[in-house]
């Protein structure tokens, strides 16, 4: 008997998007060796870690050198010192009650948004927005929850919630009952946010249908407008129906350092086959304790430094830096006559491609005329066709140069 593979993996779409981008950029550079290509497609940050974090990392390294302060295996859900800071600053300060044993420190919102589906049955019907961060779909494909994929790239058992300019990038409630709903606000890739009323409608839907909301707030720190909720738990009743994902990656430059957290309130429940309600918090604790070793002590000390006075100031500085990039891109593209969305409460700028140009056509024009690389919206889902994503995570000079080229050279 040969080792049988998990055949659901064969249903995954190839990561065509980024390989195709790389292929086209390489071909362009070979044909134009003198062109200075600027990449505004990246989802990674470019500024270094804040000094307060660096200091804390050094101190924690020194602790590891002495027998009396050395740390080995840590608690899988994270050290109490970090959970207390998260509970106080990320939630308490906004009037939200989250207990430390509801906070699970992890190595990334990618891992957690990908793994969370494991604690749910394979028969659950999954809804996600279109366009979407691909991890939500792919992790459910791997688990066998989606059925096969059609030629337009849609899986037969996934429920897609289109987000386009027509609905202000706010998904309508599903027209058929669903069990798990992935929402991401501020949104990657559209840069959209949801108002308190829109979020309340989702919480109400989840209560009515016994569904669970999987709320990805990885970009929460970029919210600028005061009336926009930062956490799903700012909505009444959300503790009964929602799991929230946060990350230090884009907030404090931890994309390479790795630290994030997930909140699973004690009230949120699923159901066993006989209908018995089951609390999800102990299930997630069990999953993490079995399969995850916890985030290194050193890294958690670095993350804790974000909450010091200096750390908070420095993080605010980082976010201001990227949001100034967002403003430069948004205003520059508008001046170039493009229709632009996002970039106000999010580091993503989502633009409508000019009439007659699809997402990939616009990619080619931008590369040819301005030598700027972005991401075709169609790569995030069928409803992303006719849109294009630029990110604010570049360095300032490159961002300014890219926008100036777009304004002066783009022949639309
Ligand atoms: N969620 C969204 C919507 C993202 O865009 C990203 C990263 O690009 C992540 C999660 C991953 O975050 P992390 O670096 O914490 O794994």
Image (cartoon, helix red, strand yellow):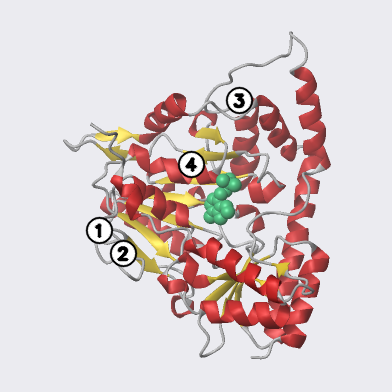
Helix, strand or loop for disc 1:
loop
Q: Which residue is mark 3?
A: 80
Residue farthest along the top direction in this orientation: 67
**Pick the front one: 133 or 179:** 133
Q: Residue at label 1?
A: 177
Marking on residue 112: 4
Which of label 3 and label 4 is nearer to you?
4
Q: Secondary structure at mark 3?
A: helix
The reply to whether residue 151 is visible in this rendering is yes
Which sits earlier in the primary sequence, circle 3 or circle 2? 3
The residue positioned farthest toward the left in the image shown? 274
Q: Nearer the viewer, residue 356 or 31?
A: 31
Q: Determine crowd level at label 3: few under 14, some 14-19, many 20+ residues with C-alpha closer than 10 A.
A: some
Tags 3 and 2 in contact by the CB under 8 Å rule?
Answer: no
- Crowdedness of circle 1 by 10 Å Cα count: few (<14), some, many (20+)? some
Kindly identify which residue carries mark 2.
Answer: 174
Q: Residues within 10 Å of mark 4 (few under 14, many from 20)?
A: many
Q: CA distance from mark 4 to mark 2?
A: 24 Å
């Amino acid at each position: 008997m040969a080792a049988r593979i998990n055949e659901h993996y064969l249903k995954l779409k190839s990561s065509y998007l980024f390989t195709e981008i790389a292929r086209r950029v390489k071909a362009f550079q070979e044909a134009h060796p003198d062109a200075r290509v600027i990449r505004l497609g990246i989802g990674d940050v470019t500024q270094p870690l804040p000094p307060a974090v660096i200091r804390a990392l050094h101190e924690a390294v020194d602790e590891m050198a002495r027998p009396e302060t050395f740390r080995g295996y840590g608690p899988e859900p994270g050290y109490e010192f970090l959970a207390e800071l998260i509970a106080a600053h990320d939630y308490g300060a906004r009037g939200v009650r989250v207990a430390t044993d509801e906070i699970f420190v992890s190595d990334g919102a990618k891992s957690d948004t990908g793994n969370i589906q494991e604690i749910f049955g394979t028969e659950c019907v999954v809804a996600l927005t279109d366009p979407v961060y691909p991890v939500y779909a792919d992790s459910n494909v791997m688990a066998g929850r989606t059925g096969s994929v059609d030629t337009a790239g849609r899986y037969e058992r996934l429920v897609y919630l289109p987000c386009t300019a027509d609905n202000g990038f706010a998904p309508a409630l599903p027209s058929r009952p669903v069990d798990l709903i992935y929402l991401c606000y501020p949104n990657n890739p559209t840069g959209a946010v949801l108002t308190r009323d829109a979020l309340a409608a989702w919480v109400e839907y989840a209560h009515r249908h016994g569904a669970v909301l999987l709320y990805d707030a990885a970009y929460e720190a970029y919210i600028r407008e005061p009336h926009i909720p930062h956490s799903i738990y700012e909505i009444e009743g959300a503790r009964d129906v929602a799991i929230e994902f946060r990350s230090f990656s884009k907030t404090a430059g931890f994309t390479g350092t790795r630290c994030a957290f997930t909140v699973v309130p004690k009230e949120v429940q699923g159901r066993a086959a006989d209908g018995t309600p089951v609390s999800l918090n102990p299930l997630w604790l069990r999953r993490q304790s079995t399969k995850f070793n916890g985030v290194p002590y050193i890294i958690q000390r670095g993350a804790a430094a974000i909450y010091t006075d200096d750390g908070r100031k420095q993080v605010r500085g980082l976010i201001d830096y990227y949001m100034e990039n967002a403003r430069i891109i948004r205003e520059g593209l508008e001046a170039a006559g493009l229709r632009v969305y996002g970039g106000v409460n999010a580091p993503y700028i989502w633009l409508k491609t000019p009439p007659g140009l699809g997402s990939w056509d616009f990619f080619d024009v931008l590369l040819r005329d301005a030598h700027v690389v972005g991401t075709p919206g169609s790569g995030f889902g069928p409803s992303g066709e006719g849109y294009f994503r630029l990110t604010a995570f570049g360095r300032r000079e490159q961002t300014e140069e890219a926008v100036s080229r777009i304004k002066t050279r783009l022949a639309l």
